[in-house]
Image (cartoon, grey):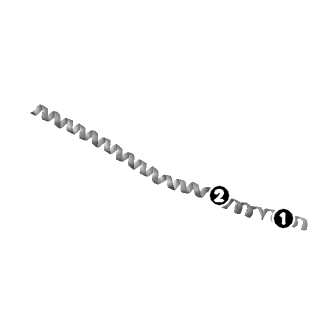
Amino acid sequence: MSSSSGRGRASGGQSTPHPPNDPEGETPLSNMILSPQRSRVKARIPQTISWTLLRYHVILLVVDRDFLVGLRLIVFLLEYYIF
């Protein structure tokens, strides 16, 4: 009984220091490793939003230009055939 309780205390004593030391050792490293990644992801999100907005604006400008050119062409042809 005393030997089994001694083993329990010994194993408990050995297991108790290791888990607190491992998470405490890993937590600052994981925070240091993860925090730049999170900041990079946050920095990339506004850039992707701005790029998508720029792409939509460019697409709208191209479509508007084509529409205006087509409209001018139609008006020119109508004026040519009417007059």
Q: Amino acid at mark 2?
A: Ser
Q: Which residue is mark 2?
A: 30
Location of residue 27 by image quarter:
bottom right
Q: Closer to the camera: disc 2 or disc 1?
A: 2
Note whether 31 is above or below 51 in the view shown: below
Q: Position of residue 33 (x, y in %)?
A: 63, 56
Instruction: Give the residue furthest to the left.
Output: 83
Horizontally, is 53 left or right of 75 in the view? right
Would you say the residues marked 2 and 1 are in contact, meaning their CB atoms lie under 8 Å apart? Answer: no
The C terminus, quarter of image = top left
At 87% from the left edge and 66% from the top edge, which residue is drawn? Answer: 6
Task: Find numbered disc 1 in the image and state the secondary structure of the residue it sits on.
Answer: helix
Of residues 28 and 10, the one nearer the viewer is 28
Location of residue 21 by image quarter:
bottom right
At 48% from the left edge and 53% from the top edge, which residue is drawn? Answer: 45
Q: Position of residue 35 (x, y in %)?
A: 59, 58
Horizontally, is 37 left or right of 78 in the view? right
Q: Which residue is mark 1?
A: 8
Location of residue 24 by image quarter:
bottom right
Q: Position of residue 3 (x, y in %)?
A: 90, 65
Tell how many labels. 2
Other residues around mark 2 within 10 Å, as few (<14) / some (14–19) / many (≥20): few
Of residues 49 and 8, the one nearer the viewer is 49
Q: Amino acid at mark 1?
A: Gly
The N terminus, quarter of image = bottom right
Horizontally, is 6 left or right of 50 in the view? right
At 42% from the left edge and 48% from the top edge, which residue is drawn? Answer: 51
Distance (Cα) linking label 2 and label 1: 32 Å
At 65% from the left edge and 58% from the top edge, which residue is drawn? Answer: 30
